[in-house]
Amino acid sequence: MKKIKLNVEGLDVCGFEWGNQSNPTIILLHGLTNNALGFYEMAEELQDHFYLYSIDLPGHGETPSFNEEKSYSFQFLSKWLEKVCLALGDQPVFLIGHSWGAALALHFSSQFSDRVKGVVMIDGGYLHFDEDLSETLEQLLEHMSQWVKESYYPSIEEYEEKKKDEIGRWSHELKQMVQRDMKEVAGGVAMRASENTVRAIAKSLYHEPCREIFSRVHVPTFLIRATLPEEGEGIRNQEAVRMQRELGEECMIRAIPKTGHVLHWQKPEETFKMIENWLHEKTNSGVRTITPK
């Protein structure tokens, strides 16, 4: 693993790289409030056959926040990501995203399909905030603000214990990732992503649902989705089927039993094997861009 830093339009973009440049390139996009090391374990698994970059998205990890809320719109963020991709190389890449990162990967593919060989979505890009009629946008944003404010712990060790319970397992790589999620503040640690950043991203997810751009995504896609909590399985299955219908025959979907939203941390071996098999299939078969209907 090697640390990297790029300068894209005056913003220092930080992250990590693994593998050999002669192999197919993968760019890894983490979820909301997480950081580039959220893919540490996955990159270690894939690095023998792929060249991987995992970047801290704006306002996360060591990459500074955007100055304006509108910059977190998927329209703007996709164009920013294209500049990041060009800074890393000029060849088409695979994208793997978790949650918000999966949504960004789809939006990016809808604008720059010639830059993308295929997209892997880890429990993201197919469920939409605006379809939850029990919660208005204002309530959603207040919920996000409260989440950030409550993410304070007297010590990093206490936060680690919380994440251990949430994930159900632990490793050196997960510990590094978790520590990088947080920053030191007076009397303890708090979430590194700011309230303004989290609210801006939530607005984008609400106002720019992926279903509106499914018809413009013309690259192979693979959704790996969670199955917990059980009461949400009906809507998860419904929305996954809808997405597959929209994206067509080059969209594959798999569910991993007894997993929640962070399934790549909860069941890494199963998740990574699915991803690795799909990537090898697309690489060896000669990935094609799908012609729009």
Image (cartoon, rainbow, N blue to C red):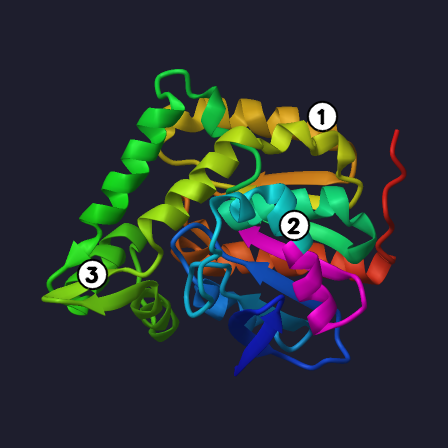
Q: Are marks 3 and 2 in contact (CB under 8 Å)?
A: no
Task: Name the residue that disc number 1 marks.
Answer: 245
Q: Which amino acid, by three-letter code, is at mark 1?
A: Arg
Which picture quadrant has residue 49?
bottom right
Residue 78: assigned label:
2
Which picture quadrant has residue 18?
bottom right
The tag earlier along the polypeptide, 1 or 3, is 3
- Residue 143 visible to an observer of this rendering: yes
Give how far across and how far down residue 93 sits, in percent.
Answer: 74, 62
Is 71 on the left-hand or right-hand side of 178?
Answer: right
Secondary structure of residue under mark 1: helix
What is the span of residues highlighted in magenta in the rendered image? 80-99
Is 91 on the left-hand or right-hand side of 260?
Answer: right
22 to 122, vertically: above or below = below
223 to 187, vertically: above or below = above
Between the C-alphas of marks 1 and 2, the distance is 24 Å
Crowd tier of the residue under label 1, counting other residues whose Cα lies within 10 Å: few below 14, some 14–19, many 20 or above: few
Which picture quadrant has residue 227?
top left
Numbered disc in front, either 3 or 2? 2
The tag earlier along the polypeptide, 1 or 2, is 2
237 to 100, vertically: above or below = above
Numbered disc in front, either 1 or 3? 3
Q: Which amino acid, by three-letter code, is at mark 2?
A: Ser
Was residue 95 drawn as part of the magenta stretch in this picture?
A: yes
Q: Which amino acid, by three-letter code, is at mark 3?
A: Tyr
Task: Name the residue that disc number 3 marks.
Answer: 159
Is 187 on the left-hand or right-hand side of 62?
Answer: left
Q: Residue at x 43, y 59 (%)?
A: 59
Q: Residue at x 66, y 65 (%)?
A: 84
Q: Residue at x 83, y 62 (%)?
A: 284
Quadrant assignment for the C terminus: top right
Give how far across and how far down residue 112 sits, in percent.
Answer: 77, 49
